[in-house]
């Protein structure tokens, strides 16, 4: 049984302007020890997917449906008390912005101790020892001296380490990291990614890594979901995704990336803007921006189904296999030329 | 043409007279004061601490570095949004560092700026037409009607619909707003545009649109860019030459090809190896050089080479004592390191084995 199994997850926000379908039929599963990458642009629904799983969406005006089975139990219908037991304990989350996700009026030690004592019946002293151990594990120098410091006394990278320490403090089975390195500099990002990899080896947790950075995905993920306009457009093993991308949106993302290992004079750009989720385009949601658009794309929505060659490589596109292989080969060729 | 004749010799830079912009040993210190009535300066943040470089017309100079390395402060000093503490900025052979407001005004037409945050840099209560046309009005370039025609022309140039003249900024997406920012910077036909992280707030597909637009505009109008970013991929894509900054100082300057294939400064090497590669085979095969710790505080920068507390090649008694000058490596490639990298790529172990010293230092046979 998969650790987490998400089936036909939908999250609709009812607003004054109409219904925003922020997540619209998403299926995936996460196994023990696996790293699932979710990549997509702002507004593609990648963060809302995770907030829905964690039950963190605002209650007002939000309607969620589908299932998110955590060890067989549906999180969407679970009681709040049950959710509180799971959150921060079995599933924990790292948020994007380390500057705003720590409480500024408590020391980090107090916050870490609180995270333990909510879930475990241990003395303050034991909890503090555990907190110190974690701070050392995430590489905070002089942890003994810094445990009683306030968040503002730490740099961005150090705060993100504190967040990671807090997320790992109860040995979670699943760690959801929502753009954990986006606000950080590259050298700090490298430190944090290396740390997450090492901790995964030590603790064996599964990770859901949400990012818009294909580079980060390539470094850390085992499986990758590509999301566009509230739907999954491609789902594959990380090597397959980068070697044989099958969806025009994925091609666009890869082509628009300036990269150190390829030297293109002009970047391939995806024309236009991501669509409004209030009134998504008919048929395939990518069709207004797709250079390969056909008549069928405008009317019929493509299903997320296995590609002919590889049953584990899911994609939602009407294009024929030959065109896809040809375009994918062009992209990977571009990278090899350099 | 009056020229900057007192450029430090070790920068390897000799002014030839055709530079558009020369920045000479610019320093910017922000005072830290204590006391309410008698504000006593107790220390200063050395945000930019002696930076020298030059740009030729039509060239793009990329400036990279982590947060707090002084790249944005430098940009603001160049176009005099901030007054420099010391040093000179020469624009077209003229020292503009201490020009009066009135004398500065015609020069402000020649150099404009594109800002990082397309959400915060446009006045939400003004219409797009006004925002783009305002520089024209300030410089009294044309009648109301001419300004309107020019604004519509600019909207078209940056790929927006000229009909959107009367819209407000909130009606546009992030990428479109950044196009408005570009149009505003272009309005007065400047020679130099300082771009301060113009694409870091944008999604990759939109980022590609803006980068392509900036390149096209450069070809069409012969623009010169100072392009500041923390993303090394983006900088490599757009720049002719790249300058790496660390803690207020220049670590390395080189043409973009050499910088990425033969970096000399260990910090540049660490930066390059930290950039995630969008290719799982290559990315995972490589061994990243992970730097320990954080960037130190610019209030009390480390002695000697500012990178020494984090440097894998640190040599005690030399790096922490003597501030390295910019040693030349040929072809305008300079790096401020006593023990430059012999080759590239290398992993962390290889990097920590020092076998050569920089040219210009007497070798002792090691």
Image (cartoon, rainbow, N blue to C red):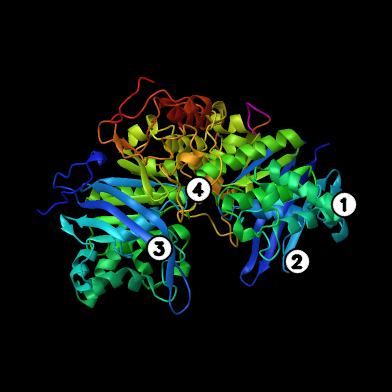
Q: Closer to the observer: label 3 or label 2? A: 3
- The image quarter in which residue A334 lies: top left
On whether disc 3 and disc 4 are found on a single subunit, the reply is yes
The answer to whether any part of residue A236 appears in the image is yes
Q: Which residue is mark 2?
A: A59
Q: CA distance from mark 4 to mark 1?
A: 37 Å
Magenta residues (range): A306-311
Residue in the picture at 49% in, 45% down? A290
Q: CA distance from mark 3 to mark 1?
A: 48 Å
On whether disc 1 and disc 2 are found on a single subunit, the reply is yes
A334 falls in the magenta region: no
* Viewer-nearest residue: A321 or B16: B16
Q: Earlier in the sequence, mark 1 or mark 2?
A: 2
Residue in the picture at 34% in, 46% down? B62
Q: Residues within 10 Å of mark 2 (few under 14, many from 20)?
A: few
Q: Residues within 10 Å of mark 4 (few under 14, many from 20)?
A: many
Q: Which residue is mark 1?
A: A120
Q: Position of residue B51 (x, y in %)?
A: 31, 50
Q: Position of residue B189 (x, y in %)?
A: 22, 61
């Amino acid at each position: 049984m998969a650790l987490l199994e998400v089936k036909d997850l939908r999250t609709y926000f009812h607003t004054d302007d109409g219904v925003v379908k922020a997540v619209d039929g998403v299926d995936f599963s996460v196994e023990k020890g696996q790293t699932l990458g979710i990549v997509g642009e702002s507004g593609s629904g990648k963060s809302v997917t995770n907030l829905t799983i964690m039950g963190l969406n605002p209650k007002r005006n939000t309607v969620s449906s589908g299932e998110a089975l955590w060890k067989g139990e549906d999180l969407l219908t679970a009681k709040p008390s049950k959710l509180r037991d799971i959150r921060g304990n079995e599933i924990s989350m790292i948020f994007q912005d380390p500057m705003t996700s720590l409480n500024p009026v408590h020391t980090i030690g107090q916050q870490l101790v609180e995270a333990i004592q909510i879930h475990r019946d241990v003395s303050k002293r034991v909890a503090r020892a555990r907190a110190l151990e974690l701070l050392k594990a995430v590489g905070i120098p002089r942890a003994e001296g810094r445990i009683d410091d306030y968040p503002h006394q730490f740099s961005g990278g150090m705060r993100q380490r504190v967040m990671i320490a807090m997320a790992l403090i109860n040995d979670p089975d699943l760690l959801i990291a929502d753009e954990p390195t986006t606000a950080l500099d590259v050298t700090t990002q490298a430190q944090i990614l290396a740390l997450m990899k090492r901790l995964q080896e030590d603790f064996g947790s599964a990770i859901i890594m949400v990012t818009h950075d294909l580079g980060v995905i390539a470094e850390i993920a085992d499986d990758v979901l590509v999301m566009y306009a509230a739907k999954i457009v491609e789902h594959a093993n990380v090597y397959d995704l980068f070697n044989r991308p099958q969806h025009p949106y994925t091609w666009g993302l890869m082509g628009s990336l300036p990269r150190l290992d390829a030297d293109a004079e002009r970047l391939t750009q995806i024309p236009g803007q991501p669509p409004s989720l209030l009134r998504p385009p008919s048929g395939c949601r990518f069709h207004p921006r797709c250079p390969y658009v056909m008549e069928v794309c405008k009317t019929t929505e493509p299903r997320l189904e296995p590609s002919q060659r590889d049953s584990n490589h899911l994609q939602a596109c009407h294009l024929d296999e030959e065109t896809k292989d040809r375009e994918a080969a062009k992209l990977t060729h571009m990278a090899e030329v350099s | 043409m009056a020229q900057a004749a007192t450029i430090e010799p070790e920068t390897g830079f000799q002014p030839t007279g055709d530079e558009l912009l020369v920045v000479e040993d610019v320093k910017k210190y922000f005072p830290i004061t204590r006391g309410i009535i008698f504000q006593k300066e107790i220390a200063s943040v050395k945000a930019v601490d002696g930076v020298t470089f030059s740009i030729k017309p039509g060239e793009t100079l990329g400036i990279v570095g982590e947060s707090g390395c002084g790249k944005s402060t430098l940009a603001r000093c160049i176009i005099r949004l901030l007054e420099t503490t010391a040093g000179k900025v020469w624009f077209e052979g003229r020292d503009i560092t201490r020009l009066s407001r009135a004398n500065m005004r015609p020069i402000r037409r020649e150099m404009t700026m594109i800002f990082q945050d397309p959400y915060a840099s446009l006045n939400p209560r003004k219409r797009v037409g006004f925002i783009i046309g305002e520089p024209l009005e300030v410089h009294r370039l044309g009648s109301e009607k001419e300004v309107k025609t020019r604004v519509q022309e600019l909207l078209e140039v940056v790929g927006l619909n000229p009909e959107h003249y009367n819209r407000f900024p909130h009606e546009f997406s992030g990428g479109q707003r950044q196009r408005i920012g570009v149009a505003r910077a272009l309005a007065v036909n400047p020679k130099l545009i300082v771009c301060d992280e113009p694409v870091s707030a944008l999604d990759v597909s939109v980022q590609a649109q803006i980068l392509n637009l900036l390149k096209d505009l450069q070809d069409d109008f012969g623009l010169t860019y100072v392009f500041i970013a923390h993303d090394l991929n983006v900088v490599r894509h757009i720049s002719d030459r790249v300058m790496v900054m660390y803690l207020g100082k220049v670590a390395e300057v080189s043409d973009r090809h050499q910088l990425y294939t033969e970096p000399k400064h260990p910090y540049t090497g660490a930066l390059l190896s930290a950039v995630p590669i969008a290719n799982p085979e290559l990315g995972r095969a490589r061994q990243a050089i992970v730097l320990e710790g954080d960037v130190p505080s610019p209030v009390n920068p480390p002695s000697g080479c500012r990178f020494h507390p984090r440097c894998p090649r640190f040599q005690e008694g030399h790096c922490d004592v003597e501030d390295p000058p910019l040693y030349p490596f040929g072809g305008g490639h300079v790096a401020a390191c006593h023990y430059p990298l012999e080759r590239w790529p290398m992993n962390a172990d290889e990097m920590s084995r020092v076998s050569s010293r920089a040219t210009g230092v007497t070798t002792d046979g090691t």
